[in-house]
């Protein structure tokens, strides 16, 4: 028996070597660097929890996490809520009355932004939102600096992210709905349940596993968000759209505060791991 | 709801679809306008004719063909290598059921969800130390490991269901483990492997952070990095911005159309990501 499993172990060797070199060692190096003052050249100087103490007092750091909360709303909560209504409407209403082709054409339209590289989506919106020649001001008859005004910038980024994310829950939820036994809906319809009651009492409970997966994956994506911030605002104006991932990037590659950047990245990694485990725990209890 | 009510629902959903697609339409419309036309008629007017000079100028200025090739080489290599690694791992974990398989799977899953910022600086430092900085090979190696971490997780579940009788029959016929993997497991799992291959390709194509950190010279950059870095530059005017947006959109939409079936079937599988 042990001989049998030993044989299979060999197949893990290439991955374990690469995995150690690319993930484990760099992650440990990052944690190690977070306890030092280091500019990236020369010898790192050990300062214990100095960077972490500094983080706690750094207003930019706290702000960046507040912005993350806003982005979780824009990337996870709002798309999930709208996505549920859209998926149910397409599956249970449009699909039945106008045919599955109409439903899948609409689904494809909502999904299309998702196929873009997120940096390219940022390029598109950077151009549309340009204060002097952008199309958004022209359409709305306004003269706003959407990304350059500190009071508007985060809300603008959030709106762009809703546009970008919306298609993902729609596709997942529609796929989930295929699993649901049509007899539930037929019985409810015979009982005279309104569309909204069917949505609340059948659709949502039935696709609860999908809702969990979407919320988890989108929350993690929102915590990690980097590309759209880099392309749209670079964290500005001021700190109006600063997020932890961009804040650590800034410290690594522009400010030469490698130790401080590592501390930010370590905290972000811990938060993501904790969020993942909490979600999986709740999901397990649900089932 | 009967009569006009159902049309109202359809109309509302159609309006939303138009809003979602509007940026694509605007990009296409304005990428074929001349700068003069854009400044007089604005972004919403229909183009007078096909003005392709803006696109051509942008293409040449950026060396866009080269960027496409870089993206293609990196994404293609990562897709193939990550599928190979995933299969090897899943063979050991899903079929071989080696000891500690659950902890290994959790480790792979955590690796896949880690923010890349928590690896970036050490990787940058190590790449410089071994002379791989600013090479596509560096991005290929790192992305292969990250994608394979997810592929292993997914494929182990699939191979865990693999019919044992077939493997036992092969063992009786004297097939070794490697032959059983190569001649039985891989061909039978081919549909799942194809889905993974396509996903890895597109995910790597869309990747931004690590390529931005590693690929700083013009010769190595990928499409998203080149477009994003250029965006802040001064010479980008309105028509050039729309041309650059169009060139970023077209390959992505093309992949979507080519792989549409696999993607919509596989997106639920990929939902775990």
Image: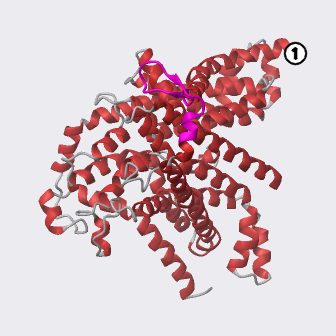
- Displayed quadrant of residue A150: bottom left
Side of A209 where B133 appears, left or right = left
Magenta residues span A33-54
**Residue that appears at 66% across and 16% down:** A13
Q: Could you say where residue A259 lies in the image, as x and y percent from the top left?
A: 50, 31
What residue does disc 1 label?
A1
Q: Could you say where residue A199 lies in the image, as x and y percent from the top left?
A: 70, 72
**Residue that appears at 39% across and 65% down:** A152
The quarter of the image holding the N terminus of chain A is top right
Q: Is residue A281 magenta?
A: no
Q: Could you say where residue B49 lies in the image, as x and y percent from the top left?
A: 16, 61
Q: How many marks?
A: 1
Q: Is residue A97 above or below residue B212?
A: below
Q: Could you say where residue B238 lies in the image, as x and y percent from the top left?
A: 22, 56
Label 1 residue SS: loop
Q: Is residue B197 visible?
A: no
**Residue nearest the observer in this picture, B72 or B175:** B72
Q: Is residue A129 above or below residue A247?
A: below
Q: Is residue A37 magenta?
A: yes
């Amino acid at each position: 028996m042990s001989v049998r499993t030993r044989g299979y172990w060999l197949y893990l060797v290439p991955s374990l070597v690469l995995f150690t070199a690319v993930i484990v060692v760099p992650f440990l190096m990052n944690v190690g660097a977070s306890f030092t003052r280091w500019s990236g050249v020369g010898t790192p100087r050990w300062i214990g929890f100095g960077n972490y103490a500094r983080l706690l007092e750094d207003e930019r750091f706290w702000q960046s996490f507040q912005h993350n909360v806003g982005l979780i709303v824009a990337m996870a909560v709002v798309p999930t809520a709208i996505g549920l209504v859209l998926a149910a409407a397409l599956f249970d209403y449009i699909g039945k009355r106008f045919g599955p082709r109409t439903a899948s054409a609409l689904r494809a339209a909502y999904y299309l932004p998702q196929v873009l590289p997120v940096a390219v989506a940022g390029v598109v919106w950077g151009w549309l939102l340009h204060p002097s020649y952008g199309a958004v001001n022209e359409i709305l008859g306004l003269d706003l600096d959407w990304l350059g005004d500190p009071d508007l910038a985060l809300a603008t980024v959030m709106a762009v992210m809703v546009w970008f994310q919306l298609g993902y829950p729609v596709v997942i939820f529609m796929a989930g709905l295929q699993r649901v036994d049509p007899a539930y809906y037929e019985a409810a319809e015979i009982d005279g349940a309104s569309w909204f009651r069917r949505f609340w009492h059948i659709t949502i409970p039935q696709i609860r596993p999908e809702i969990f997966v979407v919320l988890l994956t989108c929350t993690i994506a929102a915590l990690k968000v980097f590309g759209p911030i880099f392309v749209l605002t670079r964290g500005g104006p001021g700190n109006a759209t600063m997020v932890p991932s961009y804040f650590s990037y800034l410290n690594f590659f522009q400010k030469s505060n490698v130790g401080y950047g590592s501390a930010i990245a370590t905290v972000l990694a811990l938060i993501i791991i904790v969020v993942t485990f909490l979600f999986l725990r709740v999901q397990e209890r649900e089932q | 709801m009967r009569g006009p009510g159902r049309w109202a629902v359809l109309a509302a959903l159609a309006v939303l679809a138009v809003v979602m697609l509007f940026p694509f339409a605007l990009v296409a419309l304005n990428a074929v306008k001349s700068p003069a036309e854009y400044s007089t008629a604005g972004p919403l007017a229909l183009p007078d004719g096909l003005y392709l000079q803006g696109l051509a100028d942008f293409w040449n200025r950026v060396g866009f063909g080269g960027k496409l090739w870089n993206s293609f080489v990196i994404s293609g290599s990562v897709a193939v290598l990550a599928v190979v690694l995933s299969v090897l791992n899943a063979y050991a974990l899903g079929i071989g059921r080696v000891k500690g398989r659950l902890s290994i799977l959790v480790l792979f899953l955590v690796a896949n969800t880690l923010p890349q910022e928590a690896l970036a600086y050490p990787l940058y430092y190590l790449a410089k130390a071994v002379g791989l900085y600013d090479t596509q090979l560096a991005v290929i190696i790192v992305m292969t490991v990250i994608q394979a971490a997810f592929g292993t997780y997914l494929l182990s579940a699939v191979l865990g269901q693999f019919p044992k009788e077939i493997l036992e029959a092969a063992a009786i016929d004297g097939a070794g483990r490697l032959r059983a993997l190569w001649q039985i497991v891989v061909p039978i799992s081919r549909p799942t492997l194809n889905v993974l291959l396509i996903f890895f390709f597109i995910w790597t194509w869309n990747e931004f952070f690590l390529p931005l950190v590693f690929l700083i010279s013009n010769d190595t950059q990928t499409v998203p990095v080149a477009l994003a870095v250029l965006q802040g530059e001064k010479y980008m005017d309105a028509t050039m911005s729309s041309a650059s947006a169009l060139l970023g959109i077209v390959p992505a939409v093309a992949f979507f159309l080519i792989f549409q079936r696999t993607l919509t079937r596989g997106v639920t599988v990929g939902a775990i990501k």
